[in-house]
Image: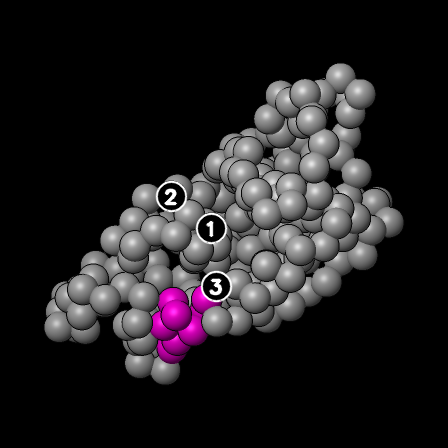
């Protein structure tokens, strides 16, 4: 059995971040972002972790280190879990790009997976680097923390559920949110999506859970 605790990083220290194409620009966490990470540390305090992985950008590394606290499990930082690189669009307001480059902005909407902004990468590129790592982690036995970005999380859930590209933005991942995916044999199950705490079943001692084994 394996369990992935999937965390979106806390809020970055960047004014109006939600209105921007953030991509791989690298701000640290805001004060609120550090508070969100501390809340996750408390929420996961009763869970034994066998390992942790995070994007090597500052906002994800900082989130992971706060969540882990003094735990002894290793943290692996990797560019494979980075957000999509948006090239010349990074740090720009979405409305600004829509106004200045309407044809490119419209092309992105028509083919969200394959579109590549100037100097950036497509979501297909992100899937090619991130999904093999997430699958490899899931094929290990144990419980693992994964701190990454909304784009990577959406692609992973899309892959798990075999959804069409039009459903990519059906998932919401707030800053500092927790989602949990569990594998038992060939069965994969989403236990929690965009939450702030462990599902009730996971908070109970092992001998009191409704686990039925592999």
The residue lying at 69 percent from left, 45 percent from top is: 2
- Which residue ends up furthest to the bottom in the rendered image? 119
Image quadrant holding the N terminus, namely top right
| 202, above or below 81, in the image | above
Q: Position of residue 170 (x, y in %)?
A: 32, 44
In which quadrant is the C terminus drawn? Answer: top right
Q: Is residue 194 left or right of residue 39?
A: left
Q: Which mark is residue 83?
A: 3
Given residues 64 and 162, the one toward you in this image is 162
Q: Is residue 150 visible?
A: no
Classify residue 83 as left or right of residue 108: right
Residue at the limit of the structure toward the top, as seen here: 208
Q: Position of residue 204 (x, y in %)?
A: 72, 20
Q: Which residue is mark 2?
A: 171
Q: Report helix, strand or loop for mark 2.
A: loop
Position of 32 relative to 122 (above/below): above
Q: Which residues are magenta?
A: 120-127
Which residue is labeled 1 in the image?
A: 160
Dot 3 or dot 1, earlier in sequence: 3
* Residue 185 on the magenta span: no
According to the image, what is the colour scheme of the structure? one colour
**Alpha-carbon neighbours of circle 3 within 10 Å: few (<14), some, or many (≥20)?**
many
Q: Is residue 186 left or right of residue 210?
A: left
| Label located before the other in sequence (2 or 1) | 1
Q: CA distance from mark 3 to mark 1?
A: 19 Å
How many numbered discs sit on the rendered protein?
A: 3
Residue found 28% across the figure and 72% down from its top: 115
């Amino acid at each position: 059995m394996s369990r992935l605790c999937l965390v979106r990083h806390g809020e970055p220290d960047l004014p109006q971040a939600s209105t921007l194409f953030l991509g791989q620009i690298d701000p640290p966490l805001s004060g609120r972002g550090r508070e969100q990470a501390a809340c996750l540390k408390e929420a996961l305090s009763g869970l034994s972790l066998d390992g942790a992985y995070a994007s090597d950008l500052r906002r994800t590394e900082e989130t992971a280190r706060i969540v882990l606290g003094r735990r002894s499990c290793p943290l692996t930082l990797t560019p494979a879990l980075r957000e999509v690189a948006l090239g010349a669009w990074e740090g720009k307001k979405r409305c600004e790009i829509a106004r200045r480059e309407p044809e490119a902005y419209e092309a992105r909407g028509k083919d969200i997976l394959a579109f590549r902004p100037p100097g950036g990468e497509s979501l297909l590129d992100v899937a090619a680097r991130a999904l093999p790592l997430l699958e490899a982690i899931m094929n290990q036995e144990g419980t693992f923390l994964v701190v990454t970005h909304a784009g990577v999380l959406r692609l992973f859930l899309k892959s798990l559920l075999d959804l069409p590209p039009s459903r990519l933005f059906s998932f919401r991942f707030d800053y500092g949110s927790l989602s949990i995916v569990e594998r038992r044999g060939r069965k994969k199950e989403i236990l929690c999506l965009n939450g702030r705490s462990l599902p009730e079943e996971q908070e109970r001692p092992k001998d009191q859970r409704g686990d039925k084994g592999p």
